Amino acid sequence: MKLLNPLPSSLALAISFSISSLASALFIQDASKSTFSQLLAKNSLVLTAFTSKNIDSLSAFNENFRAAAEFKTEVEDLKIKTPFVTIDCAGADSEEEDLCKKYDVNDYPTVRLLRRKESGDGGGEGEVEVERYRGKRTSEAIHTFALFSSLPPLTGPIPPSSLPSFKHLSPTSTIILAYLRPDQPQLVETLRAVAERHHRDFAFGYTTDMASADAEGLAMPSVVCYRNVDGDNRVLNGHFGDEDLEGLVGMCGEEGVVGEFSERRVGEWMARDKLSVYIFLPLSSSSVSTPSSLRHALTPLAKKLAQYVKVGLADAIEYSPMATNFGLQTSNWPALAVHAPLNDQVFLYNQDKQITAEAVETMLMTILEGRAIAGQMFGEEAPEKERGDGDGYAGRRGMESSGAAGEEGRSHDEL
């Protein structure tokens, strides 16, 4: 395991990103048929949300889509020029309804990326390819999809001044960056082939700057997977082939040890040989920094105790009844509760205290060592019993009546 040497944040903020495809995004609401045609003629990419502004249940999605167009990243220059357009499929305008029919939209909201190909003779507008977006409907996820789509499959060679910006394209993006010597064109082509297959989900790039590799404590060649979502980076050292890179990509795409709770996967959270740690916060409306900072803070602890504990974030809006059943107040997020499926005991973390890795580790070790009382409150001022007898019950299992509506020092793990 190697430790990255972090660049000063002030330096990263001062970097100007040089990739020409990144500029200010444009948001157009309820585009008419003629406006939409003009956008397709003038732009190689158009990200389109087929939705309705008259249906209350879609208001959150509509706001998220607008926010995606206005999304501010850590580096202000990282804005994209891909237009973000909404089409009202249930409005009074028949032209917009015709567009929904043209693109075979039967259910909404749905997001589609329209990519215009140049005509074969180079004479302008050509065929339009349609790609369905199947990711999360959060502003950051939609923004990242548009950002990755605007980049070439492989970016490089990236100059040293642009590396900090490329590695932090967005707060939850996954970046695969190769550090290669200039005399290794065959490795570039191997990287390019893998990037062609996976560039919708990851941003691929390479640099030939030896000083940048040295600053990271890496030999050349090396490939690093930067997981901005949780900082659980991975590194592939030495010469590599297609199969090696596919293995790295597979590991990078796995859910982190601090995952996300879903009622569809409730069985994973009811394993009797593990504690389940739930961190409730409004995932769909929270600023990206909150869940990201929690994942960064708790990932080392979750890896350390992975044999005994499962940790995840739960949407406080969707699973509000579940949080209430655990005994949490639903007006103070983020909030943490620990459930022991073996005996159905629940333990709470003081909601008025900041969630820190140190305090959570103390809480979990107390429970694992059998020194906690069911329903015990942990936190800075919480009492700790020297030897708990395990009696008492002060919390109900959250799943029973959740009523849920639906469903940088950073370390590298070497492969």
Image: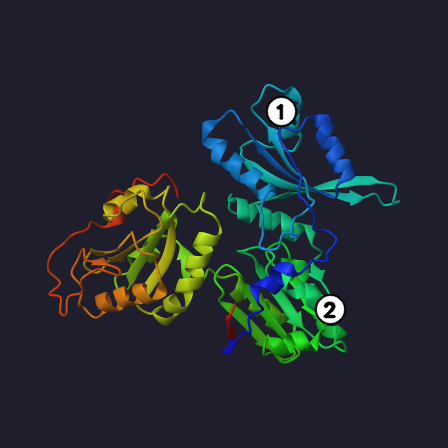
Callout 2, which amino acid? Glu
Amino acid type at image mark 1: Glu
What secondary structure is marked by label 1?
helix
Classify residue 87 by image quadrant: top right
Is residue 86 left or right of 324 when viewed as pictured? right
Question: Which mark is first along the chain, 2 or 1?
Answer: 1
Q: Residue at x 45, y 43 (%)?
A: 285
Disc 1 from disc 2: Cα separation: 45 Å
Q: Residue at x 48, y 36 (%)?
A: 60
Tag 2 secondary structure: helix
Q: Is residue 280 visible?
A: yes
Which percent across, then down, holds residue 296? 45, 62
Image spot of residue 270 (x, y percent): 29, 56
Q: Nearer the viewer, residue 125 or 231?
A: 231
For the residue carrying disc 1, how many other residues have a C-alpha within 10 Å: few (<14), some (14-19), or many (20+)? some
Residue under pointer 2 = 189
Which residue in the structure is indicated by mark 1? 97
